[in-house]
């Protein structure tokens, strides 16, 4: 299907002035696999240029080419009229190009300040000036609405804070071109708002901004021009005002999209399948109790740091926690480890897919079956054939786009990693699936696939708990929503009560009706 | 209270011979303390030269040391530190390896490493009729090893005996086993083997036995390990002789040192232990069935 | 976008060969060729048999070390553990001779396997329960085991009872269908090791724990248990090596197994297993052990190296072997 | 919509103390108390001075090792490198005596610093240019340096010229304002080390390279250069230790510095630096070196441990010291 059929006209070539950066015929192939072919693009100073496309379309690859992380196999990059060829990221940086990576690239063992200034430490009389650096760091973090302290170890920060640190790092110095590769995937509404403000102010200062996101409302709100990539090819560049969100989605996917969210199932009246009573995680969660039922999607909303992730990590013994009672399907269970959880029928999908979800250096199949080794175990040994079979099945079922099954998990595009992780957890066939940020970094087409998949789960008699920082998703998908604030569950909404406003209000100010832990049973 | 303290500093029991030294030192200490309540003997082992220097410092730190019996790791390295001990008026007995400056030591119970080598060499020259091919296994690069090899080469002087090869086997029977296997692969004809220590000889003998080679007339060692003495007593044709280098010399030295605190006049000077040939006839004298070595 | 629907293309043979796995064997072949050039006797059946047989101890222990290392651990105590379990085994066998005769050997073998497993368990528990760096723990236990064998032997040696030497001898010196027993044993150990590491759930978990502890934990793997078990496997391998070792010289001494830990780790690393964990290569490890023994053998067989410089040449060759390996990894 | 997190409160003093840094010192204090209980002489000025002075060699080398390890490397060659540079220094000094007299000492010191730096550079370049595991590289160079000193000494030893002994002696045995020179030297080395590691760009990059190589590379840090430089620093530290070492023993032998590598690494790890890199603790390292020496000292001072079991007790104490450390980390 051609772009013309979609009845949106590509923007006319902006012959205006001279663009800051011009890409001509840019291509990239890994071995015999072409992941990006013949991209022609102009990026102007003082514009926010959004790049959209499905998972694996080649967006991140394009950004890596521009910022010197990867070298193109063909084509040229012109910067300010001169052809440039960066052999390392630092060269691009010196030329005024900064990239905020899609995956978080920070050294866990170092502090926030050390990470911010890595490779460009400030010195006074030859001595590193920690005081000055910490001051600047604190200031930059505040601008971004990041509450981390400059001396915190990055490895101890929740993922959202880490993302903010990474953004702060890219904005530390003034650049001519700043690239954001899905900066908001791990952020919640507040931080997103702050970030959008900062991005706009960059533009107003005459900086060129390349912005990648799967959140099309963000793109609509922010972008001046939009370029669509599909399967490594450029579909076109459009004036943002000419594209509605549905148009973007259509251009990305190349076909008409059905409804994003499946119809809701309504409040469930079935018996509870998972009951948690009085769970506390020291420092994170105070005395939380909840009930999940089959036949409903239970949502968990809240701000960053509300302790949603910790609640379930605590439940599964992944961090020290106290709990009065856990029942699955009416039977009391003791869960001290993920293995116990699996045994009891609870599957938990982490929000940190790179750090805790996948072995990035391992191939796809071993990653897929790691939790469910029994599935490929035919006494007395593991069968590779079964393993490949499982991978084929998962690749089909979850539509994981892989060009070769011999790739390492770390070589998949971000969205496909997420789908692989989802497939990995579903290998266990759990009764209750807890999905922490189910669609983080996933394109709109796949999102709707995942939603319909969650819906199918529910209809198959399972329960599903969704932790999400994306309000729309929470509101669109869930039948019942619990809101957490500062470590406690503070509100519950179901049916008609579920609106974005109500959830935000409960998450931030607590004006919504409070729910005592006991009431939930 | 005038309890006399004798400190004994010896290398740690890292292989057979030093194991024997530690054994005899401890035996001597027990016996003397049982017999003479006014004498205390402390035995300290050290795994390296610098650790031995440290041990000396520790032993003298409290300042109430009356005598020191030391078997030094190496002469050069321990000379200075022992000098410091002597300067405090402590009676110094040196065992086996003399200090670079002989003035320091009051009593010297000397082993003769050169003789270990040369006695063996002379036996071979004699038995092989002045000609033949031998291979040699040496220990860890230290003075002792060096002196034994030196003595062996001096002993061969003037004969037509050809040393095919000398390699280190670190006074370790496993390494000696491997090395001997490789010698056997490398040299189609070997008349005799000398391992400059009995630990290594054990490995050599196994390797020879396994190879089934019959031209090797002698496989000799040195140090007086009881397993080897047993062979000599039994008249083993491959190992008919042995050169003693008895670890019990430490015991002798401790007794001689202790004597002065028991009313006798202190013995000074040098007591030289020679390295006579042990043969089937006199083997009994050198056999200590209770010793671990 | 429809790449997945295309039928999977059979990859060309050259690409299917796992070059990383091949590296150590390339190094081995190059070394063997160099060996023949240096001394034609090198390839004689006896010499090759001797060399490979000798490498059996290190190979067997190194198979265990492959587990420990790929699970993210390290064991410096294997050398002295060998000495310790050997000592225990001999003393136990000797004490049984009056009542059991040659059957004492069987009993001793059974015991040493238990003792080895316990010694490994000991290491493993301190590492996982105490949460201390394996380097330090096993450096500590290295001292402990070494001291115990010195104590048990009074600094001398612990000889095997004479009456047991003959019946036990074939375990090192014997042949079976033309192959020396130690070679067969190490092949069997490597086969079992490869089976466990590549074909069982435990093996998968081992590699996962070494690659990323968090991912392993979140995948429901009991990290501590896997790590500990790797140490137990190491202990059992040490015990098997001890069983092959005793009949060779018939005694345990305080110098038994000295510095074997370094050889074992070197064999594992030369074999292509990364020290930081996450991937184990059993067959590479075995090749690594043979490479080490071969280098030592070549040093003796060659005529132009001063005895003083043997260690230097060995060092150089090990580094070169690693370089060969690295470059054969890039086809 | 406002943020829910409260403004950062100034942490109470107790929490601001860095417990991780304190760990080794806690272990040191506990050990000292145990020492006094075992033998009251333990705390005598002479004894404490001796112990601390002796720990200087290991401490100085371990400061260098802190750089190597925190940058993600490992150096097993330090012990034999010490022997090698000591040998070079002595031979050079001896050869200059006829022409320069006691000034030969100064010349020798200058030379040994260069030789140490070069030896470190050699290690560093093989690791970074050849891209081989530091463990293997330095195991190789350990053999090389050891062989060279054996060769240089013909298997015997290399004594310092008699005429130099007296003028050189104070470098180990001398005092300056009441402090033995080696203690002062190691304090100065540690101060400089701490300055470089904590207060310079290079130091920061060192830790960054060890913490995450990829991130460091993306940040424009030349990973190879930083790693290599860490090895050079290690070499210089070895040379400094050699300078203090010679007047103590007056000779270099093929056994000089044997197994120091293990002691050095142990000191670093006991000091709180993680073996996998990313964070170096210079003062902890120094405390670690003193702890090791103190343990050895206690073994000599105590009378109730069988000579054979000394190594076992040392092993146990090292493990306990690590446990103390771990638990003092959690306030
Ligand atoms: N090193 C590599 N080797 C082979 N293929 C690679 C490599 N890196 C990326 N790819 C492939 O290139 C394709 C494009 O990946 P890229 O990360 O650019 O996608 P993306 O558009 O950013 O997707 P997402 O929205 O999921 O982040 C993917 O199919 C990916 O598997
Ligand atoms: N800047 C900060 N300073 C101090 N503590 C923080 C900070 N950010 C987070 N925390 C702690 O981390 C806890 C939970 O963080 P986390 O972000 O993982 O929770 P979450 O509810 O899962 O959020 P999300 O899933 O949206 O990222 C909070 O309860 C808080 O105690
Ligand atoms: Mg991407
Ligand atoms: Mg979370």
Image (cartoon, coloured by chain):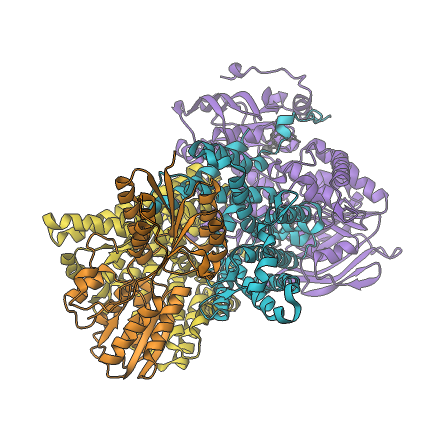
Chain colours: A purple, B orange, C yellow, D cyan
Q: Is residue D43 above or below residue C247?
A: above
- Give the residue at the far right of this rendering: A17
Is A106 on the left-hand or right-hand side of C205?
right
Is B39 on the left-hand or right-hand side of A205?
left
Q: Residue D135 in the image: x percent, y percent? A: 50, 57
Q: Nearer the viewer, residue A298 or A143?
A: A143
Can residue D68 be seen here? The reply is no
Q: Is residue A289 above or below residue C300?
A: above
Residue drawn 41% across the image and 25% down it:
A329
Q: Residue A12 in the image: x percent, y percent? A: 82, 54
Q: Nearer the viewer, residue C220 or D131?
A: D131
| Ligand 1 falls in quadrant | bottom right
Residue drawn 70% across the image and 48% down it:
A118
Q: In this view, does D295 lie above or below C50?
A: above
Is A171 on the left-hand or right-hand side of A267?
right
Quadrant placement of the N terminus of chain C: bottom right
Can residue B227 be seen here? The reply is yes
Q: Nearer the viewer, residue C296 or C176?
A: C296
């Amino acid at each position: 299907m051609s772009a013309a059929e979609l009845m949106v006209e590509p923007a006319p070539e902006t012959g205006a002035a001279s663009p800051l950066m011009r890409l001509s015929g840019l291509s990239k192939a890994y071995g015999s696999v072409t992941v990006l072919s013949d991209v022609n693009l102009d990026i102007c100073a003082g514009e926010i240029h959004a790049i959209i496309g499905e998972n694996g379309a080649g967006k991140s690859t394009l950004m890596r080419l521009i910022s010197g992380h990867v070298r193109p196999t063909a084509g040229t990059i012109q910067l300010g009229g001169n052809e440039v060829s960066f052999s390392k990221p630092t060269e691009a940086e010196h030329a005024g190009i900064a990239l905020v990576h899609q995956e978080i690239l920070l050294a866990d063992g170092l502090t926030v300040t050390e990470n911010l200034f890595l490779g460009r430490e400030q010195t006074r009389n030859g001595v590193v000036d920690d005081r000055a650096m910490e001051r600047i760091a604190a200031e930059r973090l505040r601008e971004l609405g990041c509450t981390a302290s400059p001396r915190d170890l990055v490895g101890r920060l929740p993922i959202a804070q880490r993302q903010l640190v990474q953004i702060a790092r890219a904005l530390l110095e003034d650049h001519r071109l700043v690239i954001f590769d899905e900066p908001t995937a791990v952020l919640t509404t507040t931080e997103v708002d702050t970030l959008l403000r900062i991005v706009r102010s960059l533009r107003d200062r005459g900086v060129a901004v390349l912005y990648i996101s799967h959140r099309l409302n963000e793109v609509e709100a922010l972008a001046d021009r939009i370029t669509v990539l599909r399967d490594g090819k450029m579909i076109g560049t459009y004036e943002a005002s000419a594209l509605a969100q549905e148009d973007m989605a259509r251009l990305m996917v190349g076909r008409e999209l059905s409804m994003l969210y499946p119809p809701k199932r309504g409040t469930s009246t079935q018996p509870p399948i998972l009951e948690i009573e009085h769970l506390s995680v020291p420092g994170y969660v105070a005395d939380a109790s909840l009930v999940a039922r089959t036949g409903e999607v239970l949502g968990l909303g809240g701000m960053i740091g509300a302790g949603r992730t910790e609640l379930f990590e605590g439940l599964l013994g992944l961090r020290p926690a106290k709990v009065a009672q856990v029942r699955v399907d009416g039977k009391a269970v003791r869960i001290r480890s993920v293995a116990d959880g699996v045994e009891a029928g609870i599957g938990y999908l982490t929000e940190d897919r790179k750090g805790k979800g996948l072995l990035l250096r391992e191939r796809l199949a071993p990653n897929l079956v790691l939790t469910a080794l029994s599935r490929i175990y035919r006494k007395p040994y593991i069968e590779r054939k079964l393993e490949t079979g499982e991978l084929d099945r998962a690749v089909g079922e979850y539509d994981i786009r892989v060009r070769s099954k011999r790739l390492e998990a770390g070589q998949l595009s971000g969205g496909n990693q997420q789908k692989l992780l989802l497939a990995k957890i579903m290998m266990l066939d759990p009764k209750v699936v807890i999905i922490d940020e189910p669609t983080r970094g996933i394109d709109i087409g796949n999102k709707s696939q995942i939603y319909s998949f969650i819906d199918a789960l529910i209809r198959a008699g399972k329960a599903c708990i969704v932790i999400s920082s994306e309000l729309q998703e929470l509101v669109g998908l869930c039948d019942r929503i619990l809101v957490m604030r500062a470590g406690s569950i503070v509100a519950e909404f179901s049916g008609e009560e579920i609106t974005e406003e109500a959830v935000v209000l409960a998450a931030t100010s607590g004006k919504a009706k409070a729910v005592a832990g006991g009431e939930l049973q | 209270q005038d309890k006399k303290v004798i400190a004994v500093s010896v290398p740690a029991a890292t292989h057979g011979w030093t194991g024997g030294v530690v054994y005899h030192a401890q035996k001597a200490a027990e016996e003397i303390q049982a017999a003479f309540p006014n004498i205390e003997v402390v035995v300290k082992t050290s795994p390296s030269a610098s650790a031995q220097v440290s041990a000396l410092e520790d032993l003298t730190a409290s300042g109430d040391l009356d005598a020191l019996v030391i078997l030094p790791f190496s002469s050069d390295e321990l000379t200075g530190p022992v000098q410091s001990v002597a300067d405090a008026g402590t009676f110094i007995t040196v065992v086996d390896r003399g200090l670079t400056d002989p003035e320091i030591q009051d009593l010297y119970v000397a082993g003769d490493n050169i003789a270990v080598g040369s006695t063996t060499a002379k036996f071979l020259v004699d038995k092989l009729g002045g000609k033949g091919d031998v291979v040699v296994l040496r220990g860890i690069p230290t003075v002792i090893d060096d002196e034994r090899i030196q003595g062996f080469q001096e002993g061969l002087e003037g004969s037509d005996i050809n040393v095919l090869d000398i390699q280190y086997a670190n006074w370790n029977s496993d390494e000696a086993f491997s090395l001997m296997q490789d010698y056997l692969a490398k040299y189609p004809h070997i008349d005799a083997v000398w391992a400059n220590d009995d630990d290594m000889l054990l490995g050599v003998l196994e390797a020879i036995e396994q190879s089934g080679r019959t031209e090797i007339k002698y496989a000799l060692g040195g140090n007086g390990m009881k397993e080897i003495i047993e062979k000599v007593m039994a008249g083993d044709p491959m190992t008919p002789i042995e050169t003693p280098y008895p670890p019990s010399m430490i015991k002798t030295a401790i007794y001689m040192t202790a004597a002065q605190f028991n009313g006798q006049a202190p013995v000074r000077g040098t007591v030289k232990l020679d390295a006579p040939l042990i043969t089937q006839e006199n083997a009994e004298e050198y056999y200590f069935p209770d010793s671990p070595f | 976008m429809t790449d997945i629907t295309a039928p999977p293309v059979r990859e060309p043979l050259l690409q299917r060969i796992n070059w990383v796995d091949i590296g150590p064997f390339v190094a081995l072949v190059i070394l063997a060729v160099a060996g023949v050039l240096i001394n034609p006797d090198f390839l004689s059946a006896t010499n090759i048999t001797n060399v490979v047989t000798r490498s059996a101890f290190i190979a067997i222990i190194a198979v265990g070390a492959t587990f420990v290392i790929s699970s993210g651990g390290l064991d410096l105590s294997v050398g002295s553990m060998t000495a310790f379990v050997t000592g225990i085994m001999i003393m136990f066998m000797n004490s049984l001779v009056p009542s059991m005769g040659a059957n004492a050997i069987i009993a001793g073998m059974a015991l040493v396997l238990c003792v080895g497993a316990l010694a490994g368990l000991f290491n493993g528990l301190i590492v996982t329960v105490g949460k201390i760096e394996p380097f330090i723990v096993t450096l500590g236990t290295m001292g402990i085991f070494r001291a115990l064998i010195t104590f048990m032997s009074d600094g001398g040696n612990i000889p095997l009872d004479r009456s047991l030497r003959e019946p036990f001898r074939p375990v090192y010196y014997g042949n079976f269908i033309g192959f020396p027993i130690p070679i067969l044993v190490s092949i069997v150990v490597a086969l079992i090791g490869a089976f466990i590491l590549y074909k069982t759930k435990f093996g998968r978990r081992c590699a996962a724990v070494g690659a990323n502890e968090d991912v392993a934990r979140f995948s429901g793997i009991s990290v501590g248990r896997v790590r500990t078990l790797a140490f137990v496997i190491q202990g059992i391998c040490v015990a098997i090596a001890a069983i092959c070792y005793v009949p060779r010289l018939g005694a345990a001494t305080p110098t038994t197994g000295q510095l074997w830990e370094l050889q074992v780790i070197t064999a594992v690393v030369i074999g292509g297993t990364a020290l930081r964990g996450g991937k184990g290569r059993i067959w590479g490890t075995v090749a690594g052990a043979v490479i080490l023994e071969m280098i030592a053998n070549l040093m003796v067989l060659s005529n132009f190296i001063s005895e003083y410089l043997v260690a230097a040449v060995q060092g150089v060759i090990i580094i070169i072997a690693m370089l060969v390996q690295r470059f054969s990894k890039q086809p």
